[in-house]
Image: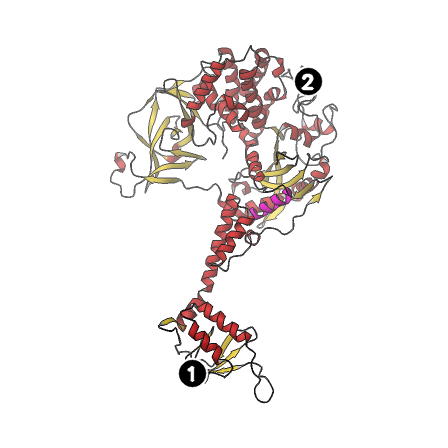
Amino acid sequence: MFIVIVSPAVLVVFGYGYITDSISAVHLKMARNVKCQSYWRTRRDILCSVDAYDFIDPPGGESPEEPLLETGEGETCTFSDDGEISNTDVNDGAEAYFYCDSDVCQTHDSLSESDGLCGSDCDQDEDLGNLIAAWVRQFNIPGVAVTRLLHILHTYHPSLPLDSRTMLGTPRIVEIKNLSGDAGYCHVGILKGIEKLFTSTPNDSCFADDTVELQINIDGLPIFKSSSMQLWPILGLLKGSSIKSPFTIGIYAGNSKPQDLTVFLEDFVSELRQLQTSGFDLNGRHFTVKIHSFVCDAPARAMLKNIKAHSGYHGCERCTQKGMYRGKVIFPEVNAPLRNNVAFDEMTDPDHHHGPSSLSGLSIGLVSQFCLDYMHLVCLGVTRRLLLMWIRGPLSCRLSAGLVHQISERMVALRHHVPCEFARKPRSLSEVDRWKATEFRQFLLYTGPLVLKGLLSDVLYKHFTLLSVAMYCCLRTDLCYQYSDYCHQLFVMFVNHAGDLYGKDILVYNVHALVHIADDVRSFGSLDNVSCFPFENHLGIMKKLIRSPTLPLQQIISRLTEHSNGVENCSRGMTNLVSKKHENGPIPTAFVGCHELVQFAELNTNGCVIKACDKDGCVILKGGHIAIVQNIIKSYSGVYVICRRVVHTQPFYDYPLLSSHLSIVSHSELSTECCTVPYHDIVRKCVRLPYKTGRQFIILPLAHNDK
């Protein structure tokens, strides 16, 4: 007597007896040795035993096409060529059980149901794979580590790929154009970057019109300390877009800067000329491309325009002044004749040009649309030079070690009062050689006027405020147009007095170019519109994509392709209006007892984070009132801020103008009563810093905007 149990996925034989004399012993041994083995283990054992058995030819000398087994109920079980077991003429309503030695392990119905879950499991694995891919792109996880993780997870999630390149969509081949020597260039494309942004945010404000404004940056980037290998990326940024991250147009890699600009820029110029002439179509709409500006540092501008370097006698890009040599080339004049686009294209000043520019064929102004970047010119240039003059300069302007130490102490004391918009907190002047551009900007606009007052001599302090006030007005979006002519006068005064206070040697290109900055304000508005800050941030991210010195260009292109395949970057910059619930803030009487009232600690508005604290809660309201946020509430009628107004304000300085005209004031008191205002009445966030004894505070509205 024997019993055979048949299911669509597996054939299990147990009991005593035999099907044929040749296979019964094998199955009987398996049934006795398998004690509560898993379903898949039993299935594999049976299939392996069947595959390994050589069936005996039946009488007559001919082997059947498929060996047959009887099931006892008129059912026939067949073995297919691939080792799978199938059955025919099976009763639909029959229940079959798999018996272990002692008790029931699993029913046929339950096995069938588990097989049916494969689709949902695969969907879950796909979601898990997308989450892992987003995590890898966000934290730049090395591929070998991701591959090892996938091998570990594969046991539990068989649908996941086993290689990181499959998951991330890493390109198998990266097309590199070989230039001179070992240099190479890869062109990603302008249109590809625009299409990526349009796909992610089709309703972005930059696509509101049929003309797309494009800002271009080209700069060099050393990637290794022990090698001369460097990158020269071509980056693009769509003006007016809510996404402030640039995209890559092309990348050059070599042991020196590009030697032949025509070859380096060939693909870029060709595509840009085509887009300017014919435009492009997206989602049934036709767009044309217009160059907003080129934003580069001085050496890169000279290279692209094929003109004399900024250290040359005819190196000024905006005026025809010939420099003087005083150990270095200086530019003492402030009223020299200005250059214009037509004269530049005609090369009327041959001493200024090396030859025609590779960009001459494009519809751009090679004078007016090549902006003077204040990050390099003012922050890393003039502000840094002033600090070094005070610390290590001539005795006529050098500060004593004691004064330098006091200034450093004042700056370090402000660390806990600087708002969260500043990624770097104030540091001591002993580390000035390691300061970044954002730290020089912070000193120039906010902390410098505070920590220098009373320690720097009156004449040097007033000279410094000329630069600080002028730059502050040029960066404020609500003041730049109104004060552009006034700022030009302040810059001219600063340059004229700089030679008298610090010596003529200070009148190098960076200091002289201050007299031309107001021209860019009139053309483009706030200097943050034509700043290198977003591009420098992107270059830092790009540098981290290189994981080994082998084929750095191919590595970057592969990583950029992986990022473009992801979808998590499409919503970058989108944040909730309010966040961080709490229950311990002041509540207005009108809202007491409201069941739908929720309190929050943070509010995101106007590109800033407002918090219910002294450091991040100082704001300017409509009407010019300054207040300190005490709480943020949300009810059925909207979002409100509970705040205490600043009273009895006074101007902080009176030269070159009353600081209260710029809403820069000092105060020592707050109103005793709280007021409730809608969140959209907040006009601007402020920096609130303690002064002198700590009872007095200086309030400076935020001028720069990196968002």
Where does the magenta region start and end? 550-564
Q: Does label 1 or label 2 sit earlier along the sequence?
A: 1
Label placed on residue 338:
none
Say what amino acid the circle numbered 2 marks.
Gly
Q: Does the stretch in magenta take in 555?
A: yes
Q: Residue at x 64, y 41 (%)?
A: 250
Residue 234, x across and y down, in percent = 63, 38
Q: Quadrant of the N terminus?
A: bottom left
Q: Residues within 10 Å of mark 1 (few under 14, many from 20)?
A: few
Residue 571 image position (x, y, % from top left): 48, 45
Residue 68, above or below 136: below
Residue ID for mark 1: 2
User: What residue type is disc 1 on?
Assistant: Phe
Q: Residue at x 53, y 23 (%)?
A: 432
Residue at label 2? 323
Local SS, label 1: loop
Which secondary structure is most common in the magenta stretch? helix
